[in-house]
Amino acid sequence: MLEDAAAIAAICQPIVEQTIISLEEVAPDTDEIRRRIETTTASYPWIVACDGDDILGYAYAGRHRERAGYRYSVDVSVYVEEYARRTGVGTTLYSRLFAMLEARNLHRAFAGITLPNPASIALHRRFGFSDVGVYREAGYKFGKWFDVMWLQRAL
């Protein structure tokens, strides 16, 4: 997985620099992606989708909140290379990720989506996510405020 850090950083860079899909403002470099993978995989899965040697996307889960009572809940994220979107890569990644989370007897998954993002909302709906609510003007990027929709699903 660590060997995929450069390819993951390359997927992440245009998402961070050109879109509101991620509310990060500075794209993480390869070393930062390696650090994130190491930190995440100590407790949760991080997976990639490949076509030969090409990384098409990645998905991961992480701690939902700090308090011990939240230990059976996770936040999930999926990111797909622009040319591979709407080809089933996100669906494949989430199918595998949710199977892994269910095998760990985790209880609930949460996802935050910066609005507008109809493609991400549609993907999450296909996996049975339902609305939790919208945090109004919770994110700031490109000189504008953005709402963030939160969704949940049982595992």
Image (spheres, grey):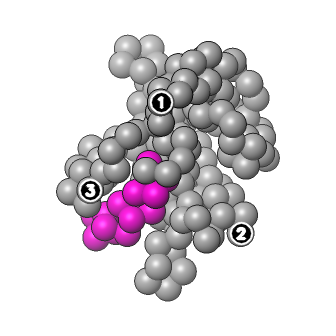
Taking the image as shown, residue 123 lies to the left or right of residue 50, namely right
Residue 72 can be seen, yes or no: no
Q: Dot 2 corresponds to which residue?
A: 87
Q: Point out residue 109 in the picture as x, y percentages from the top left corner.
A: 59, 33
The circle drawn on residue 143 is: 1
Look at discs 3 and 2 and give the one toward the viewer: 3
Provide the residue span drawn in magenta: 1-16
Of the 4 image quadrants, the one containing the N terminus is bottom left
Labels 3 and 2: the sequence-earlier one: 3
- Which quadrant of the view contains residue 113? top right
Taking the image as shown, residue 60 lies to the left or right of residue 95, namely left
- Which quadrant of the view contains residue 96? bottom right
Label 1 crowd (10 A; few <14 / some 14-19 / many >=20): few
Q: Is disc 1 in contact with disc 3, using a CB cutoff of under 8 Å?
A: no
Q: Is 47 drawn above or below residue 22 in the view shown?
A: below
The circle drawn on residue 29 is: 3
Calculate the distance from the C-alpha at mark 1 to the C-alpha at mark 3: 23 Å
Taking the image as shown, residue 36 lies to the left or right of residue 71, namely left
Residue at 75% over, 43% down? 118
Labels 1 and 3: the sequence-earlier one: 3
Q: Point out residue 116 in the picture as x, y percentages from the top left corner.
A: 69, 36
